Image (cartoon, rainbow, N blue to C red):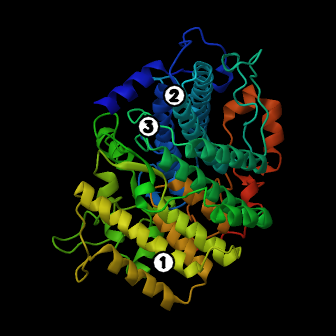
Amino acid sequence: MKLISAIVLSISLTSCFKDFDQLRENPNYPSKVDPESLFANVLYTSTGSFYGVQGQYFNLTAAGIWSQHFSKIQYIDEDWYEYRPSVMDEIWKRMYAGISGETNLAGLYDLELAIKAAYERKANNEEAGNEVAVRNDEALIGALKTAKAYFFISMTDAFGDIPYTEAFQTIELGYETTNFQPKYDDQEFIYKALLEELEEANALLAIGGSIDGGTDLIYRGSSTKWQKLANSLAARIYIRMSTTDPSFATEGLTALFANGERPMFESNADDAELQYLGSQPYMQPIYYNRYIDNRDDFAVSKTVVDMLKENNDNRLYIFAQPSPDSKPGVPVYVGQENGVPREESPSLNTISRIGNLFREQAAGKSFWMSYAEIQFIKAEAAYRLNVPVGDYQTFLEAGIRASFEKQYSEVAEYNAPIYPEVGVEVGQPGSDAQIVIDELKASGKDPMTQIMEQKYLALFSNGAEAFAELRRTALPRIHWVRGARQYERGLPNRFPYPFSEQTTNFENFSKAAQGIEQTVYGKKVWFAEKSPEIDYLINE
């Protein structure tokens, strides 16, 4: 009940801006709001804006589709890259300023308000000589800065250059006037600024203060785990930068991995994730889409199913469900090819839906980052950048095992049924992971292909991260979208900028949009400027 109360209280207090240009002094906004309530609201609603009920379009209908984790089987416009402009406007508004509706949803602006309030409280506690309270304020600020970095990474990865330094220049945050037309910062600058934020967050969280567990919806008050997340996110940024600026990334990763004062994820227990309560509206988003919205729009992609089958990977039975036309006792798994031509409309009875663990569990999870991802980052750093962290094969295998252990443990946690194919026995995570490891060793695939394919699978359901890594490395090889007509040049280089920015912030938008063609092609986002071209699978 404490968790529910924290969410409800914070939602009732949050600001509601109808558009980005309404970041101004709001007479209806409470002058004093405790930062913990704002923090809870941002964690829930901003995570939701990427993965959850409020923002299904970001993950399910955009990044998760374009990265080919999922495939649409009805109303498949987005599978042809034919996005809805109003949706891109909504994503932008939700993340920057929140959005009005039946429920007021917080955004990054509310996170800035929380940081400001926490600093003010810290100053008051310093003046009062309350050292314990100061340490607690510092821990909260560290967690707030870490969350800020996470959401900004996701936004710049999707859109490229975005407002950052001038994004929140408002009267409420102490500026003399409100800046309605913030400039766009380039992605390289944003990454480096976020690395500084995360370094500061690490120092603040290392002090050992406490965070209110009732309003920390990710780690239930563990400053230690927030510290690990801060440094793990720094590793994510460095590896993202490594294709365009390998020397900077190599130096950064080498220093990060060698620094004993910058701990990172050490096990699956450190994973950053939001667990839903399971009651409306706090439900796992894929479940909500199916059973509350009463939709049946998504299947598992052919890309994912084929990749799993290739290595006798028993995660198939977790990521997918048997096709509806499977005979009793003879489950069949068929992935849907993304973006088939219009005359080849998917046959709904023959296609596997997303797995029970995701689609049938109201109290499921959305995850930001996992221990497995850190292992794959280390594997790539060791193999491609020669970072002296160890042998890449060791980290590749550790990442595979971590993913199996994570998925198998959550199947047990949620009692989510799985249905192996005839003749297949699902064993323990370690032994089943070893099957995949042995298949990879015999496959003859180059190490980067192995690393990125396994990372892609470990990221299943986190479409935003998979979409970013696909554009950065051109791996794994995905299916050409044969049915595309309007967007026929392959995988988009970015999310399109929202139309509202063209009307409310035209001068700055125009500078950022130079070189972009057909809204999603042309100029690449900075981290992918030197990336190889996508090498597509040949459809059978």
Q: Is residue 63 visible?
A: no
Q: Which residue is mark 3?
A: 216
Residue 403 location, x and y as percent? 42, 67
Q: Say which label, 3 or 2, has the lower sequence index.
A: 2
What is the three-letter code of the residue carrying label 2?
Ala
Q: In this rendering, would 9 be left or right of 524?
A: left
What is the three-letter code of the residue carrying label 3?
Asp
Secondary element under disc 3, as helix, strand or loop, is: loop
What is the three-letter code of the residue carrying label 1?
Glu
Residue 161 location, x and y as percent? 74, 44
- Label 3 and label 2: CA atoms lie apart by 17 Å
310 or 347, which is in the foreground? 310
342 or 251, which is in the foreground? 251
Q: Which residue is mark 1?
A: 397
Q: Which residue is mark 2?
A: 133
Q: Say which label, 2 or 1, has the lower sequence index.
A: 2
- Label 3 and label 1: CA atoms lie apart by 32 Å
267 or 3, which is in the foreground? 267
Report which quarter residue 535 is drawn in. Answer: bottom right
